[in-house]
Amino acid sequence: MYVAVKGGEKAIDAAHQLLAEARRGDVSVPEISIRQIEEQLSLAVDRVMNEGSLYDRGFASLAIKQSRGDLIEAIFLVRAARTTLARFGYAEPLDTAKMQTRRRISAAFKDLPGGQILGPTFDYTHRLLEEVMPLEAAQLADQLVVENMPKVLGLLGDEGLIEPALPSATTVGDITQDPPSFPMPRDERLQSLARGDEGFLLSLAYSSQRGFGRTHPFAGEIRLGEIEVSFVPEELGFEIVIGEITVTECEMINQFKGSADVPPQFTRGYGLTFGHCERKAMSVALVDRALRSAELGEEVGSPVQDEEFVISHSDNVQATGFVEHLKLPHYVDFQSELILLRNLRKEKAAE
Amino acid sequence: MSGPVYNFAYLNEQTKRMIRRAILKAVAIPGYQVPFAAREMPMPLGWGTGGVQVTAACLTQDDILKVIDQGADDTTNAVSIRKFFVKTAGIATTDVTDDATIIQTRHRIPETPLNENQILVYQVPIPEPLRFLEPRETETRKMHALEEYGVMHVKLYEDIARFGEIATAYDYPALVNDRYVFDPSPIPKFDNPKLNNSAALQLFGAGREKRIYAIPPHTKVKSLDFEDFPFSLPKWDKPCAICGSQTSYLDEIVMDDQGGRMFVCSDTDHCRKTQALK
Amino acid sequence: MIEVDSSAQNQAKIFRLILEAMSHPGRIVDFKVPSLCPPYGLSAEMATLLITLCDFQTSIWMKSKAVGIEKFLRFHAGATFTNTKSAATYAIVNDPEKLSSLEEFAQGTHEYPDRSTTLVIQVDTMSNDGRISLAGPGIANQTRFNVEKLGVVFWANVAANHAQYPLGVDLIFVSKGKIAAIPRSTQVQVQGQD
């Protein structure tokens, strides 16, 4: 006699135990600490903070450990934790010109006020696997930090060569508090891109470079550094500094545009990320500019220019959830398809 | 070491208020999809987070919660969601449909008729019934605004031309209160008649797609069809092999590799109840 | 561990009563509210309802703004106020008999009919009798609904509100210890004398 399958609860408990064992691996190997992750896998931490939309290195490091290094799973953990946090208000806008800059490059000018600062970068390293990479192997370089470094695009703006960067609205939207609707203003679009999947945005940016929605970009400026975050509490009524964060900013200079009334000017694409996420910041800037195609009167036809397509599919927490939900039981619906298909075949055979 | 401290039912109070406002609008406009700023929950998007958020916004300490997936209380995801609410809200749970005040479901409507003190919360993957005919939200929203559902009727009619009948076995679209075509979530069309004139309030939550919609009690819900091709229900040749029910939705169990099959109730509570009556 | 926050529990219970009223138009639901001392012009029922539903994302309209009420709701709900009816998420209506029309409140748009005002109306007594008959979603067959002092003009406005469904406003009535609702989906008819 058949007995309906039982024991979902036991199976889940057992699976969780197996997961705990798999997470730990060989117990004769020392356990990795959260501080080690924070210090030594810092770019993974940065990515998790970015796409998790929460600036907390400790949370992100813990999430990376708990997820066995599966960064999308770690991002998901951080997002779920974020849901429980009460909102106090909005910080004052960051002025990235005031950044304590550790890295700053421009591909548009050979030299410029403030100079080019390479900083901590993989660029120009030879990608050779090295078993020995302790600090002592390297000459401790002096970290150059420059304050109030002028913005490259500002230099062009003085001459009117680039469109001004104007706010798209008087009040800034918040995609975490209001459901998104299309068409989406640029401020909300940039927020969505900031938490979008790095791989997806990278591929979209790449597609625009290969001609599917070309924008003729120059890396006007990429800068990395620390910046203070300020907040005005209602009860105080004046600004207080609540902390310092690391950000990467990318400003692209793109194909110019002009009209009967306005002389031709370069246009902008913008990307800002938490931590050091240069590839992501560049991808965001390229995709941001491509998504402005309609606004700038360009022909729209490529995936990267399609706002609904890009924004609706850029969130990897949403994407992974829905793709992976196919693992859940679907046998009720499958049964109704079976009945239907058998019927249709019976009718066909009877014809 | 004590574990983390959660607000009652996980969500913070401001999030609950936002969801509650959306639910009230949804009830006032039956079948219309109200956008809401869904949050990430500690289970994956696409695994019932919309239903979980709706339930979390409705729950009081006095509620008795039942969670089913595929009609059964002991399917893995139902177990997981029930555990989540026990852990974060400390509420009582039950397997018995009659005893529950809130029932969260995926893919089924219980066989036992619901009463007016109950709320049925559906987990919804894709809330837009027109989505697979028109992928753009900007377009489908216009179609709903203009009550322009021709594209749906064309699709159903093409089915008839190709297969001789409407080839939609689940997720079968229906018209709510003579105004909005809506997606009943992927319940089998067998369950569609239960949507109509139910005594219970039915709430639908789509977390990933950020939509909430509702069917108030005693509301007309009509499955789409044509006069010459009326809506029809699937039939099984045999009754449930366990309880003998001839009126319930049956799952097909593969018994061996010789083509052996048996059919049993998908609604485990209904099956138990019918057995007890025998 | 679950944080025991009595206000979270209370608000959940209050919401369920509001939800019951909205799901069963015309049903007069017992509305027991916690004891609080709202300023003059704001009943305990009205105050409780607004504190349960409002926060920094909603804006409240009222006809003649009273500083006390505004201060109270700002403090307890963080709600903002507006002078423009069509910008209000919630409207406080203390003298519904003087309300000449419902059309100036936000009606929603055809794409987003939910972007509309909910009116919270203070009344003295409600009963399920009289000449006003309600039908539609949430009502098995039909029900009677009577509000003291509200006459033909008011009910004609409510009927006109329904006529533009799915656009329109939703109405919530509160009286001492009671709550009822008439969402835009409800058909309103004035029955003959007999």
Image (tube, coloured by chain):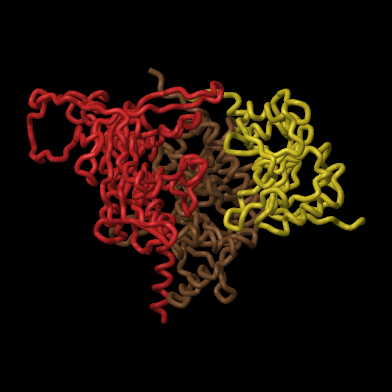
Chain colours: A red, B brown, C yellow
Image quarter of residue B16: top right
Q: Is residue B216 left or right of residue C135?
A: left
Image quarter of residue A244: top left
- The reply to whether residue C141 is in sight is no
Q: Position of residue B260 (x, y in %)?
A: 34, 59
Furthest residue to the top?
B1
Q: In this view, does A266 lie to the left or right of A176?
A: left
Q: In this view, does A101 lie to the left or right of A309?
A: left
Q: Where is residue B29 in the image (x, y as percent from the top left)?
A: 63, 53
Q: Residue at x 28, y 58 (%)?
A: B257
C150 w.r.t. B90: above or below = below
Q: Which residue is drawn at 83% across and 38% down?
A: C125
- The reply to whether residue B111 is in sight is yes
Furthest residue to the right?
C194
Quadrant that contains the C terminus of chain A:
bottom left
C16 w.r.t. A325: above or below = above
Image quarter of residue A209: bottom left
The front one of C76 and B240 is C76
Q: Where is residue A300 in the image (x, y as percent from the top left)?
A: 38, 62
Furthest residue to the bottom?
A351
B118 w.r.t. C177: above or below = below
Q: Which residue is drawn at 49% across and 42% down?
A: A173
Q: Which residue is drawn at 48% across and 41% down?
A: A174
Q: Position of residue B103 (x, y in %)?
A: 54, 43
